[in-house]
Amino acid sequence: MVLQSLKNCLWLSCVLRTPKACFWSTASGGLIIQSVSNDVYQNLAVEDWIHDHMDLEKQQILFLWRNSPAVVIGRHQNPWQECNLRLLRQKNIKLARRRSGGGTVYHDLGNINLTFFTTRKKYERMGNLKLVVKALKALRPQLDVHVTDRYDILLNKQYKISGTAAKLGRTSAYHHCTLLCNADKFVLSSVLKSPYKGLKSNATASVPASVKNLFEEDATLTSEILLDAIAKEYAVQHQIDHHITLINPADETLLPGISNKTKELQTWEWVYGKTPKFSISTCLNIAYKGSVLDIKVNMDVKHGRIEACNIDLPEQWLPSGLHSELVRSLTGSKFCPNEITMLVTTLLKVCPQDNELHSRWSLLCENMIRLM
């Protein structure tokens, strides 16, 4: 405990808390900032704000940040295809869609995020990743780490410890990457495994990989030590002072308009509604009175809403009018368990008072909601 406290003190001694009203303009050549927030939406909003407002001709920026448990999907990805949404809801893990492309990643406090901001002309992701590798080697020369042609960083030639993505604007650009320090690998593997069957989509698909924490290789490599080493190497390469400026992503004085950016990233329309069109063709196997019924379901989903729906029910399973009303009500609704639960509950109220009918209806609706 004493040793760890000493390490933390040494790390904090490297941090300069520059007055927030002026540090954007006082830093010339380069700037290293770190978020005091662990909220994924706030930190992604900082990326948007810097990209949209900073003059990166005058100074390049390294942004350091960590998040509480969250799954972050790429701009053109399908969350139903990429992760276990039911498990995220059960564990209260946030889902976010970033503005860059690339694959899906799991974040927690054992995962470091690095964002390199430059002009589009100076954008160079390979150089950034080599900087990270050089920082790791400076800490522990024996580490076997290298950058691949896919812009991943591998440990021991087989374990992925860093993934990468980027956004290229008209004049500005940023490249961000992760670095696995001591993330919960059990949760990571659980939430990044989609249980949804029969889903067809042209959305960008993630490429699975074996991962390992740097902490497993060397238990002295804490997040604080890694952050400081990367900041130090960045400062050396950009010929600037080794100072990390702490920022609060909720500070409207420092970042005017940041609250609106944060709110937008949390909306259903952004997280789910930006999903590329997809379809589901599956068979619900419903156990009822000692037998198993196969109910075929086909749906087209566009902008996160059910565009077309067909439910192939056995004869006399539901009254034809109720079946038609269910399909009609689903069409145009959000492909979302909360909305569909409210919808089917409302329909149930107008059902005839028949216990067996209510049992069949509940079974069907429970299985439909599991698709979401």
Image: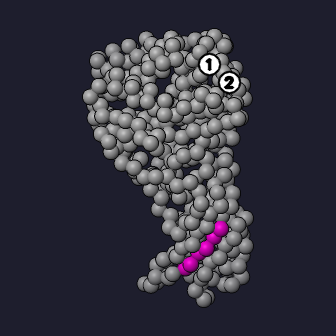
User: Residue 4 in magenta?
Assistant: no
**Viewer-closest of 339 and 172:** 172
Left/right placement of residue 226 relative to residue 126 reads left
The structure residue drawn at horizontal position 58% and vertical position 68%, both measured from the top left corner, is 280
Predominant secondary structure, magenta span: strand
Look at the numbered discs 1 and 2 and tell me whether their residues touch, using CB distance below 8 Å.
yes
Residue 348: x, y in percent? Answer: 66, 72
Q: Quadrant of residue 276?
A: bottom right
* Quarter of the image that includes the N terminus: top left
- In the rendered image, which residue does mark 1 sit on? 59
Residue 321 image position (x, y, % from top left): 71, 82
Q: Amino acid at mark 2?
A: Met
Residue 297 part of the magenta segment:
yes
Which type of secondary structure does the marked residue at label 1 adopt?
strand
Looking at the rendering, the stretch of residues picked out in magenta corresponds to: 295-300
Depth check, mark 1 against mark 2: the one in front is: 1
On the image, which quarter does residue 256 sit in? top right
Label 2 belongs to which residue?
54
**For residue 13, above or below residue 339:** above
Identify whether 230 is placed above or below 176. above
Badge 1 amino acid: Gln
Mark 2 element type: loop
Where is 323 relative to 123, above or below? Answer: below
How crowded is the residue under tag 2: few (<14 C-alpha within 10 Å), some, or many (20+)? some
